């Protein structure tokens, strides 16, 4: 018989990092969401919940942004909390979610299997948006994580 112990300090720390990350993700998502709205991409995001609507798309986008921000916070919170880490972490975060989200998951969820890993002008613009999301999230995360 084995026993498992949970380190309450680490659990609390992960919770604080996830919360700071979620808040930072919402800020990054707001900036990226404004860009997506200007490019009329939000109705497509709404299609993830079968509602081709910009407002619904924005809400879905913000929920995803908070979740991705929380994941970012837990992962990056294990590294030094400084501008270099934020810059590198934000870029990596943006690229990872561009590949997973825009190039793989979004086309699959929308039934557009022929669009998986297709890279055209819209996907390059999406990469720019994801990089901005990653960097804004990273630089907002720094002071939030230091407060916690």
Image: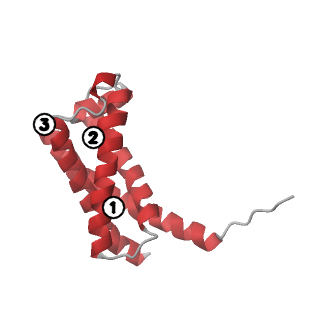
Is residue 137 in sight in this rendering?
no
Q: Which mark is residue 47?
A: none
Q: Earlier in the sequence, mark 2 or mark 3?
A: 2
Q: Secondary structure at mark 3?
A: helix
Q: Which mark is residue 121?
A: 3
Q: Nearer the viewer, mark 2 or mark 3?
A: 3
Q: Residues within 10 Å of mark 1 (few under 14, many from 20)?
A: many
Is residue 102 in sight in this rendering?
yes
Q: Nearer the viewer, mark 1 or mark 3?
A: 3
Q: Secondary structure at mark 1?
A: helix
Q: Residue at x 26, y 67 (%)?
A: 87
Q: CA distance from mark 1 to mark 3?
A: 28 Å
Q: Position of residue 120 (x, y in %)?
A: 16, 34
> Is 117 situated left or right of 75 in this image?
left
Residue 99 vertical position relative to residue 85 in the rendered view, above or below: above
Q: Earlier in the sequence, mark 1 or mark 2?
A: 1
Q: Residue at x 31, y 30 (%)?
A: 116
Q: Position of residue 51 (x, y in %)?
A: 32, 26
Q: Residue at x 31, y 57 (%)?
A: 92
Q: Which mark is residue 58?
A: 2
């Amino acid at each position: 018989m084995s026993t498992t112990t949970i380190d309450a300090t680490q659990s609390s720390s992960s919770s604080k990092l996830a919360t700071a990350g979620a808040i930072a993700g919402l800020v990054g998502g707001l900036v990226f969401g404004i860009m997506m709205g200007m490019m009329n991409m939000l109705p497509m995001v709404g299609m993830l919940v079968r509602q081709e609507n910009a407002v619904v798309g924005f809400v879905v986008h913000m929920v995803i942004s908070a979740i991705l921000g929380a994941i970012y916070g837990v992962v990056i919170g294990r590294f030094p909390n400084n501008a270099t880490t934020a810059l590198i972490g934000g870029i990596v975060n943006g690229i990872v979610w561009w590949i997973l989200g825009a190039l793989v998951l979004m086309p699959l969820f929308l039934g557009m299997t022929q669009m998986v890993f297709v890279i055209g002008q819209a996907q390059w613009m999406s990469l720019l948006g994801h990089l901005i999301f990653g960097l804004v999230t990273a630089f907002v995360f720094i002071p939030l994580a230091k407060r916690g």
